[in-house]
Image (tube, rainbow, N blue to C red):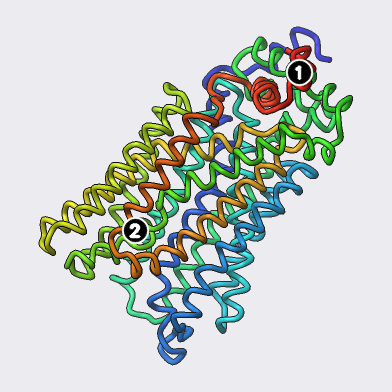
Amino acid sequence: MPNPSQEHDTQTTTLSVQQRLFFVVLVATMGALAYGYDTGIISGALPYMKLSAREGGLHLTPFTEGLVTASLTFGSAIGAFISGYVSDRFGRRITLRSLALLFVAGALGTALAPDIATMVVMRFILGIAVGGGSSTVPVFIAEIAGPKKRAPLVSRNELMIVSGQLLAYVVSAAMSLLLHDGHMWRYMLALAMVPGMLLFIGTFFVPASPHWMVSEGRVREALRILRKLRENPQEVKKEMAEMRQHARAQQQGPSARALLQEKWVVRLLLVGATMGIVLQFTGVNAFMYYTPVILKNTGLGTSAAIAATIGNGVVSVLATFAGIKAINHFDRRHMLMAGLLVVIAMQIALGATLTLLPQTLTQSLLALGCILVFLFFMQMCISPVYWLMMSELFPMKVRGVLTGSAVSFQWLCNAAVAFAFPPLLSMVGNSAFFIFAAINVASLAFVMVILPETRGKSLEQIEDHMRQRFGDARDSQVEATHP
């Protein structure tokens, strides 16, 4: 252990600590930026990919168009699940570095794909990176940030996702306007390599997770890292004491395999999986993917309907900024409940607008207003809280595995909504929005009755609380001996 003077020397000023944390989060969220760009750019690339090979496209049919689009989503589900095991075994930083290589390889492969089969395979590989990043980045940031800064810093993950989507929309619009080349979809997809390369390079300049280091018995290294990431020795001492206490408890307790079979952990995983239903069955992707279709049904022109998609991206970014501010001042559950109440109201309002009003400019503007208000509260109150809670809910020994499993299920819900919305709209018409509203009433009840609060607690305190909340009485009595 270093003497007091050495310890003082290793402490950095508040400003330098903030700068270091900012850099670590910036590097990690390059994965989120790539995630957002990759999921958003396909909407601009598909019209050119549908051109014939002579015109520079891949001659996509409706079936192969859906296959190309969906391959990333299914790859994401698998990537989120696999990365959880890799993250727990080899660490968060190594996992991110590996995912960065997949981002670059997938982006390059899609840009150079000579045929549809190759495109599907490369989009699937890219999806593994997207899904892996979506489960690993929030956990890494949460373990780096500390209790005080965890909420706003993890929320920057969501900010980079929506920023990546907005960037994709702007790039698509700019290239379509400035370039007159049937191959421009290849340039759109190739740009996704940039955040992947920045993530790969950046992982060589950021520290490993101190929580993971302590769990692996590398206490001295964790202490050295923590001193550079906290503002005073008292924070370092308190956090290290909690981490070491939990590490000892984990060594004496069940193995990771046995822990996964404990009732409280299974129940907690079900809570995490249900949160995926809460997030995706708001219908957010129905709005993000199909806003032009919805607005064209009101009589709005094609160009105006497509331009509204950029509006979605702008509103999402502004809302996420507001969410980062709010999440430090309000409980997670209260934010979710407020967001769901507005989401339900806007879905009912949109359904009524499309059903009861004639196809006029007034109907178009009211429908667009409902969509934008929906997205604002969705991205301010629901999405940031989801990703934050995925980084906090699960116990350290199996955090990567459980986060990966819960996020993987969320990706499957994403795919289900994206696939189900067009046929649902054709079957029941605008009543589809009333169905989403009813589902969200059930989600609101889940949040009010079952979802635990995590604000203001360290990751170790959250783990204790979850064991008490979801464990049997005997488990709670045992856990009470570990304050």
User: Compared to 161, does 74 lie above or below?
Assistant: below
Label 2–label 1 contact, CB within 8 A: no
Q: Secondary structure at mark 2?
A: helix
Instruction: Tell me residue 266's x, y (percent).
Output: 71, 38
Q: Residue at x 43, y 39 (%)?
A: 382
- In the depicted view, which residue is nearer to us: 90 or 385? 385
- The residue under label 1 is 479
**Could one spot residue 62 in this view of the protein?**
yes
Total labels drawn = 2
Q: Residues within 10 Å of mark 2 (few under 14, many from 20)?
A: many
**Residue type pointed to by label 1:** Glu
Q: Which residue is mark 2?
A: 432
- Residue 146, image x and y in percent? 61, 24
**Which circle's residue, 2 or 1, is located before the other in the chain?**
2
Helix, strand or loop at label 1? It is helix
> Which residue ends up furthest to the bottom in the rendered image?
54
Gap in angstroms between the C-alphas marked 2 and 1 = 46 Å
Label 2 vs label 1, nearer the camera: 2
Hey, which quadrant is residue 148 in on the image? top right
Q: Farthest residue in the right direction?
A: 252
Residue 167 horizontal/vertical position (percent): 39, 55
Q: Quadrant of residue 184?
A: bottom left
Label 2 amino acid? Ala
**Residue 226 seen in the figure:** no
Which image quadrant: the N terminus?
Answer: top right
Q: Residue at x 50, y 69 (%)?
A: 69
Q: Is residue 192 left or right of residue 294?
A: right
Nearer to the camera, 67 or 443: 443
